[in-house]
Amino acid sequence: MRIIFFGTPEYVLPILEMLHKAFRDKIGKSSGIAAVVTQEPKIAGRDKFLAYSPVDTWAHKHKIPKFHNPSELVEKEISADIGVLASYGKIIPKKVLNHFPFGIINIHPSLLPKFRGASPVQASLISGENQTGVTFIKLDEELDHGPIISQFKEEIQMADTTESLRNRLFERSAEVLKTLLPAYLQGKIKPTPQDDKEASFTRQLKKEDGFIDPKAIKAAMQGKNSKKKRKIPFIKNYSLVPSAYSLEGFIRAMQPWPVAWTHINLGKGQELKGKRLKILKAHIDTKDAIRKTQYERSNNTSPVSRIPYLVMDEVQLEGKNSVTWKQLLEGYPEARLV
């Protein structure tokens, strides 16, 4: 079996490693990977050095041919039975799709047709889903539209960030693909079309997408819900009501990038007025809805509901080290969210 892998970021390396080891030739000398296609290196840092993608670096280490333009596969007649794509980040031309006898399998971290597009893991966390999963589809010309080969579900943990959940999804994908791929090539699995009526869409995140209205944070820290819905720009036609729970989920979804942030006024005479404040970590706590009398407390009468409120555990001003919210207020007693 000859496989060409399309991918770019570090979190897809478990899939690449599995394909490399599990599908060697019969005498175990040749890799299961005939070539990789990854994004071209980018200029980075103050020194403007060329930064190669993790997949690019992996291919160089293992002496496997690599390409930055998928069309080169056709032009240079690089043949393979099937392609496997995971977070490649670019559109695959039709001539490349038709280059593989069994097509290209796209590994998408959501339960398609829900959350098509570039940010499905973030969308799952923000929307308060209890579970998500991974869908293996046969790639076609439309965005995450192809017929479904297989799916698996994964529970979302209360402390999951985009990073932790995404890593877990792709690690499990490698395990599933190990048995799925041979079965698919042997014709044992028939792909089924997606229900386009159930489709929802996400786009690539931008730095400004991490913004939270300071008034919404202030209300959530007091155990109040905002009356105004907030539109989430990178999830098409989706809005949420800012609350302690929804904002805590949003903060986790923005890790590791672009990170949730808001505006803060550090007080009179401060040069950092209206400064951007990153919110790196938060949790939910609860308090009594009403205060009990001493008699009610001692006799455990008059049941009281609990109000959830947001606690900011770790925040960071630009150019400063991260601190707790309490430490920030100790350093800037007049600080307030504005």
Image (cartoon, grey):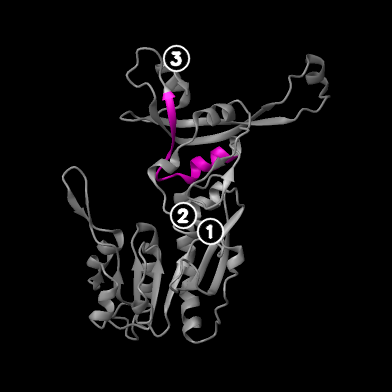
Number of residues whose C-alpha sits closer than 10 Å to that of mark 3, classed few (under 14), some (14–19) or many (20 or more): few
The residue drawn where x is 27% and y is 77% is 73
- Helix, strand or loop at label 2? It is loop
- Helix, strand or loop at label 1? It is loop
Q: Which residue is mark 2?
A: 119
Three-letter code, disc 1: Phe
Q: Give x and y (percent) for residue 32.
A: 34, 78
Number of residues whose C-alpha sits closer than 10 Å to that of mark 2, classed few (under 14), some (14–19) or many (20 or more): many
Residues at marks 1 and 2, CA–CA distance in whole angstroms: 8 Å
Numbered label attached to residue 255: none
Q: Which residue is mark 1?
A: 115
- Name the image quarter holding residue 293: top right
Confirm or deny contact between disc 1 and disc 2 (CB under 8 A): yes
Three-letter code, disc 3: Glu
Left or right: 148 with respect to 7?
right
Residue situated furthest top in the rendering: 269
Confirm or deny contact between disc 1 and disc 3 (CB under 8 A): no
Q: Nearer the viewer, mark 1 or mark 3?
A: 1
Q: Which residue is mark 3?
A: 334
The residue drawn where x is 32% and y is 81% is 28
Q: Is residue 37 above or below residue 283?
A: below
- The magenta-colored residue range is 246-264
Q: Give x and y (percent) for residue 3.
A: 35, 78
Q: Is residue 191 above or below residue 16?
A: below
Left or right: 101 with respect to 225?
left
Residues at marks 1 and 3, CA–CA distance in whole angstroms: 42 Å
Residue 32 visible in the current orientation: no
Total numbered circles:
3
Q: 164 or 50: which is nearer to us?
A: 50
Number of residues whose C-alpha sits closer than 10 Å to that of mark 1, classed few (under 14), some (14–19) or many (20 or more): many
- Name the image quarter holding residue 286: top right
> Which of disc 3 and disc 2 is earlier in sequence?
2
